[in-house]
Amino acid sequence: VQLQASGGGLVQAGGSLRLPCAASGLTFSSYSMGWFRQAPGKEREFVAAISWSGYDTYYAESVKGRFTISRDNAKNTVYLQMNSLKPEDTAVYYCAATSGRYSVSYPYTQNHRYDYWGQGTQVTVSS
């Protein structure tokens, strides 16, 4: 199984980035997908998740209203659209896949619920 995140880079505060994560080696449509991030000196934290069907999405409070998670099961890809970026959004962003199917948000926020992880892509937001 491979999860390949890309699209990171350097952007000014207020700008936008779109992170795709391409999955292979798994039945993508059967997995819920999540995005996490880790800033230097901090623990990895939940950003957003989308259910296997795409019908349900969940967000951390810090990104709600600015970030949008979506998926294209035909392309085996999950996306994170990031708008109104802030310097505190600077981190390495990771995508992850979970076979769990949950009807509430909390399980999606927990690292150990995920079966597979991508390698991460760096996002740097300058002030």
Image (cartoon, helix red, strand yellow):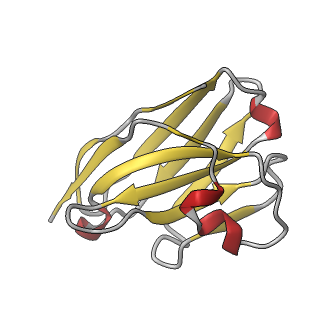
Q: Is residue 1 left or right of residue 120?
A: right
Q: Residue drawn 65% across and 57% down?
A: 113
Q: Quadrant of residue 108?
A: bottom right
Which image quarter: residue 107?
A: bottom right
In this view, the residue farthest toward the front is: 112
State which quarter of the image contains the C terminus: bottom left
Across and down, in percent, residue 49 comes to 64, 57
On the image, the x and y values in percent for residue 118 come to 48, 37
On the picture, is 51 further left or further right than 108?
Answer: right
- Please, which residue is most extreme toward the top here? 25
Count of marks, rendered view: 0
At a point 59% along the width and 66% down the height, the residue shown is 110
| Residue at left offset 26%, top offset 59% | 90
Q: In the orientation shown, which residue stands out farthest toward the bottom?
A: 61
Which quarter shows the N terminus?
Answer: top right
Q: Position of residue 47 (x, y in %)?
A: 51, 63
Left or right, residue 88 beside residue 34:
left
Residue occupying the point 82% across, 38% down: 30
Q: In this rendered view, identify the residue nearer to me: 68 or 96.
A: 96
Expressed as whole percent of the image width and height from the top left, the position of residue 98 reads 69, 48
